[in-house]
Each structure stands twice: as C-alpha cells, then as structure tokens.
Image: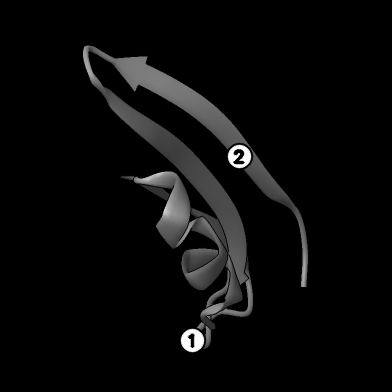
Amino acid sequence: MAKKSVASLQTGSKRLTKAIKMVKSPKTGAYMFVESIMSPEHVNDFLSKN
C-alpha cells in the first residue's frame, strides 16, 4: 500500500489530528486519498483499516 501523512491540529482546548491515507479503488484500480480529522488516539486504527 502506500503513503500516509499525519498532521497535528490544535483548536482551543481540543487536540485534533488530520490523517491522510492512499487507498486503491476496487472498481477502477486507481489510487485515491481518504482524509479524516480525529483525536490522536484513533489515528493508528484509521491507518490500519483497509
């Protein structure tokens, strides 16, 4: 699989993380990027999902 990128965002008292992963489309075979903003504890779960 491919590339992953994690950036930390801080808004007020909450600390958030934006995670970006590249996934392969089952229909076309092309790669696309999936982005999500979440708490830092959930990043590894997001990146390990297929």
Tell me: 23 left or right of 40. Answer: right
Q: Quadrant of residue 21?
A: bottom right
Residue at the (52%, 87%) spot, across then down: 26
Tell me: 31 left or right of 19. Answer: right
Residue farthest along the front direction in this orientation: 13
Q: Amino acid at mark 1?
A: Lys
Q: Amino acid at mark 2?
A: Val
Tell me: 49 left or right of 31. Answer: left
The crowd level at tag 2 (other Cα within 10 Å; few <14, some 14-19, many 20+) is: some
Q: Position of residue 29 (x, y in %)?
A: 63, 79
Give above or below for 13 relative to 15.
above
Q: Which residue is mark 2?
A: 6
Residue at the (37%, 18%) spot, across then down: 10
Q: Which residue is mark 1?
A: 27
Give above or below for 40 relative to 48.
above
Give above or below for 12 relative to 7.
above
Q: Are marks 1 and 2 in contact (CB under 8 Å)?
A: no
* Front one among 13 and 49: 13
